[in-house]
Amino acid sequence: MPKVFVGVGSNLGDRASYLEFAQKELLSCGVTVAEYSPVYETEPVEAEGGPFLNAVWSFDTQLAAPVLLEKLQQIEAKANRQRNKLHEARTLDLDILFYGDQVIHEPGFVVPHPKLHERAFVLVPFCDLAPEWMHPVLGRTMKQLLEELHSPHGVRRIPRGCVAEAYSAKQSPNTIPRWQDS
Ligand code: ADP
Ligand code: MG
């Protein structure tokens, strides 16, 4: 079974609840997430709205890649994800980063995700899970890609146990407790 990595993000509404919702929904479509990265709060990149909560999850699945994409989009829709315009703030974003070492180039579906190597909000949590994972197109490990990133700023780990209570989008960033590397 191929190992899948999914990038998860939310910057609208009760962000932590949307992440939790996505975990439960994945379970109900037969996917058991095997590994969760810590959750990070990150500055928006190419997106409107406030800071994101981001994480990377990995699991094995028997779902074919296009079927998995469809499931993820259904989960986004159930989380009230609006798609009115490009780059708008979103309650839930679920991107397939890797589907094993498969390379897919279809209209509306590209794997590995074409921007993952440019994004600290993906590479940082990814490296918590699988720093030695090899990008099948770029031929670099995730750790190497992170080291080569010019500006890995704007990504702060949330201590475990603080995600649900402290990080609803209703709070101003000033009320968020000090970030720690835990
Ligand atoms: P983004 O995640 O880039 O901010 P969206 O979530 O709005 O943007 O997705 C835009 C489109 O990207 C979707 O319609 C989806 O079909 C497409 N897409 C292409 N490749 C992938 C992938 N690997 N994972 C998820 N969506 C993808
Ligand atoms: Mg997306």
Image (cartoon, helix red, strand yellow):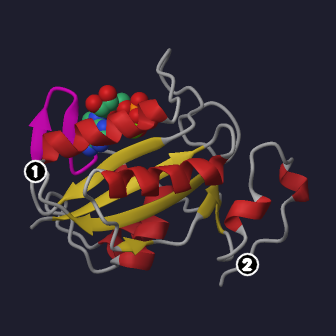
Q: Residue at x 20, y 35 (%)?
A: 109
**Callout 2 crowding tier (Cα within 10 Å): few <14, some 14–19, many ≥20:** few
Which corner quadrant of the figure contains ligand 1? top left
Percent position of residue 130, x then y: 33, 77
Whether disc 1's CB lies below 8 Å from ligand 1 is answered no
Q: Residue at x 62, y 51 (%)?
A: 17
Disc number placed over residue 180 in the picture, else none: 2
Tell me how far mark 1 sits from mark 2, CA to CA. 36 Å
Q: Give the range drawn in magenta.
A: 104-113
Asked where in the image residue 69 lies, by quadrant, the reply is top left
| Magenta stretch: helix, strand or loop mostly | strand
Judging from the image, what secondary structure is the residue with disc 2 in?
A: loop
Q: Please tell me whether residue 182 is drawn above or below residue 7 in the rendered image.
A: below
Say which of 58 and 164 sits in front: 164
Say which of 64 and 39 sits in front: 64
Q: Which residue is drawn at 63% across and 42% down?
A: 11
